[in-house]
Image (cartoon, helix red, strand yellow):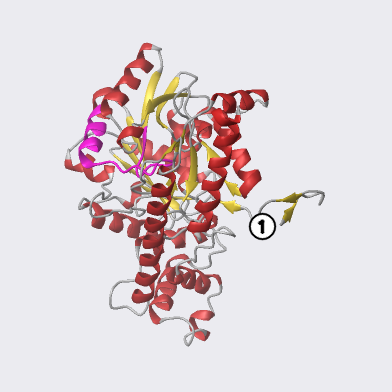
Amino acid sequence: MLKTDEGKKELPFDRVVSSNIGNPQQKGLDQKPLTFGRQVAALLEYPPLMESGKDIFPEDAIARAKELYDEIGSIGAYSHSQGVPFIRKNVAAFIEKRDGYPANPNHIFLTAGASFGVDLMLDLLISDHNSGILIPIPQYPLYTASIARHSGVPVSYYLDESKGWSTDPAEVERAILKGQEDGVELKALVVINPGNPTGGVLDEQVSEQLVKLCEKYGLVLLADEVYQDNLHEREKHGFTSFKKLVRKLDSPVPLVSFHSISKGVTGECGRRGGYFELTNVSDEIVALVYKMVSVGLCPPLGGQIGVDCLVRPPQEGTPSYQLWKDETTAIHNSLAKRSKIMSERLNALPGMSCAPALGALYLYPKIELLPKQIEAAKKIGKAPDMLYALELLDETGICAIPGSGFGQKEGEGHFRLTCLCDGVEEYVDKLEDFHRKFYAKYGPAGQ
């Protein structure tokens, strides 16, 4: 049993289950870091190991560290403000291999995680209190927070839960026209693919229509693609980048694409590494972005090294390849398995439905709101699904985020769970037991 800080009350669980955030290596979730990336990082933290550690570290990890050391020198020194040029060239090669279209290293900016790049772009786009940014609902709260910080206007378009949280271009256009009708100067369309918090994955046809909408209405496309390697049914529901589609369509739409080492199978949230690529953006604007990032001197070197290992993993035939392959396959398989088990069992509960997640790290079940629950939540000044999440935490130790934190239609309730938690059977057992008791408490039988 756990106790409160005061030690006066025993809690009815022995640990807190951190299912509220996509932080894979957090204590209690304990996803193991990929060995190759950590070996390269260790060698660059203490370069003498490149010689003294030849019996400990594999040959290809030492070779990678030496190659990066020759380009960077000490990771205790500032790098180029845009990121190490050599690493940006490697990111460009990764993008070209993924999409089949070239990438310009001078239009790639390494960042302290994708969130830094998102906030920077919103700062650039929001020029006054009337600048509008189209965002999906539900959405990752980074966007509403950053838009508010820069005094912009969030303009919502709703994802379709009945179709696996798909994006309907007609709904996006409805939101565009509504924004125009309200006198908002729309600047950009945010698309999160795969989706957070929903786990939805866009198909190419829908993505192409979104590009054409941006073209039609003169919008910048902000493509949050940090979960591009988190695909649970890769063969049926694959990832296609917006960069590939913009080039395929020969579209002039300005595009900013974001990626990160925090998600995927890397899960290096604390090392703060990521990048964004500018496509169809003028040299004048690229120069302005460079001035803005220069204020921060440079992105963290540890994160930049993480990006290099993300875009240049061990290749078949090298000493580290088989271990890397085994580690990444195990992570992909466990995420897909947990997601499937959780969605099937949650869907079997009364008053709950859960669209299967095709990607990302989360499930986003819907709960039927009960009159007595709504009344009880109102008395304490909370949203009804916040009441659910608070009681879930108090009774089971499972920490989840209510849907009211991501945005949802009036009168709905949801909560987000990660599929990162090990011991999923026991975890869902507790959730099922809580849910039945909650519905007995607030449902007709409890009135």
Along the viewing direction, whichever of 134 and 329 lies nearer the viewer: 329
What is the span of residues highlighted in magenta in the rendered image?
190-213
Kindly indicate the quadrant of the structure image that contains residue 178. top left
Who's the residue at 44% across and 52% down the image?
274
For this orientation, the residue located farthest to the bottom is 55
SS for dot 1: loop
Q: Which residue is mark 1?
A: 14
State the residue at coordinates (53%, 76%). Answer: 47
Relative to 30, say whether 339 is above or below.
above
| Quadrant of the snapshot with the N terminus | bottom right
- Give the percent coordinates (x, y) of residue 117: 45, 43
- The residue depicted at 23 percent of the width and 55 percent of the height is 235
Instruction: Kindly give the residue lying farthest to the left in the view shown.
Output: 249
Please provide percent x and percent y for residue 198: 40, 41
Q: Position of residue 352 (x, y in %)?
A: 44, 37
* 242 shown above or below 313: above
In which image quadrant can residue 285 be found? top left
